[in-house]
Image (tube, rainbow, N blue to C red):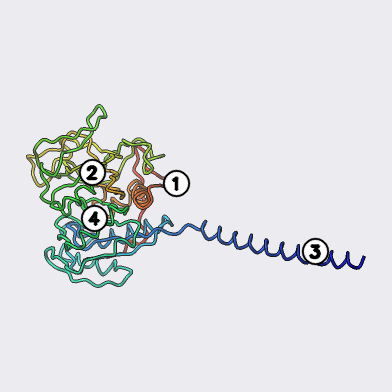
Amino acid sequence: MKRLTTFSLMTILLMSLIACSADKTAKEEAAKTTLTETPKKLKALIIDGENNHGVFPLTTILMRDYLLASNLFTVDHARTAFTWQGPHYDQEALGVKAADAAILIEKYPLPNGQKTIAVEKPTPDSTFNPDFAAYDVVISNMGWQASTWPAGTKANFEKYMKNGGGLVIVHAANNSYGDWDEFNKMIGLGGWGGRNTETGPYVYYNDAGERVDDPSDGACGSHGPQQEYVLTTRSPEHPIMKGLPTKWLHVYDELYDRLRGPAENMTVLATAYSDVEKNGPPWDKKVNGTGRHEPLLMAIDYGKGRVFHSGMGHMGTAMECVGFMTTFQRGAEWAATGKVTQAIPTDFPTETATSTRKWANRKPL
Ligand code: ZN
């Protein structure tokens, strides 16, 4: 009996130890699971510094806020050492004269405290060399006439993209670097920047809803006065577009047309119609709109990398469109991961009604 009791006690002790050990292991596993289930934020880098859209210090911080609001991203910044702010400030909306546009750099400082030198014309920065490989996605808020990057920086960026990096192109970012062949492949289509027939075909949709890749000669890049226009979804099953309405009305913005480029591995996500009369460029009354359905949202595969390209976003006011905001957030996630987990907001625009959310961090000037 005594032996049995000792045996029983030892058994109980042993069982307890095993149970305790099993319990500890289970707890450790649970802790590990919790850790791995906590989503790690994606790392985004916004690059800027040279843009004919002198409003860029404002739109960079606005886009930063959109990325942070998605709760998916951390956001860093890389600005060229020499900042060039071109003539597009939306002076009326902002209430600043062109000469005062530099105030935007002070009003919307970079969170990293980086100080830059304002210059009157784009000036190459030989030190510009962000650590692209440290990021899941790079957002370009550069613009027309942005200076060529140092050769090493270009090579690093090409390597980053080919190895599976992400890139988001917003509006005039598709004007930059027209003579950089690999960049043209990344963005699919571009405008201005010396691009021409040799850069690649025009791409548009015809009235029958067919994509046309048109190699004919002609200028690259044009737009009319700002206007409201309807976006038409062309790839409803693409992760960025899934669940969005087939047609939705965008707020007052420029409508880029006559874009051309290699257009390789490019999916047109949405188009907008460039009206012949309404989209004639104000700088040349002899040129009209195209009468074609122009690509304004695109997704491009480049090596193992992904590019989301939005032609919208002339000014901060255009970016306050819930349609711009939603496609930007979804496009950035897709460029970073190949997937989209974000829900479509209930205030998304409809075919007949725009939808705007005033940006809360806009500063009085
Ligand atoms: Zn513009």
| Few, some or many residues within 10 Å of mark 3 (<14, 14–19, 20+) | few
Residue 14 location in percent, x, y? Answer: 76, 65
> Between disc 4 and disc 3, whose residue precedes?
3
Q: Nearer the viewer, mark 4 or mark 3?
A: 3
Q: Between marks 3 and 1, how big is the CA–CA gap? A: 55 Å
Outermost residue on the right side: it is: 1
At a point 18% along the width and 33% down the height, the residue shown is: 291
- Which of discs 4 and 1 lies nearer the camera? The answer is 4
Q: Nearer the N terminus, badge 3 or badge 1?
A: 3
Kind of element beneath mark 2? strand
Mark 4 vs mark 1: which is more N-terminal?
A: 4
- Residue on which disc 1 sits: 343
Q: Amino acid at mark 2?
A: Gln
User: Mark 3 against mark 1, which lies toward the viewer?
Assistant: 3
Instruction: Look at 41% across and 47% down and name the residue there.
Output: 340
46 w.r.t. 197: above or below = below
Tell me which amino acid carries mark 3. Answer: Thr
Q: CA distance from mark 1 to mark 2?
A: 28 Å
Marker disc for residue 158: 4
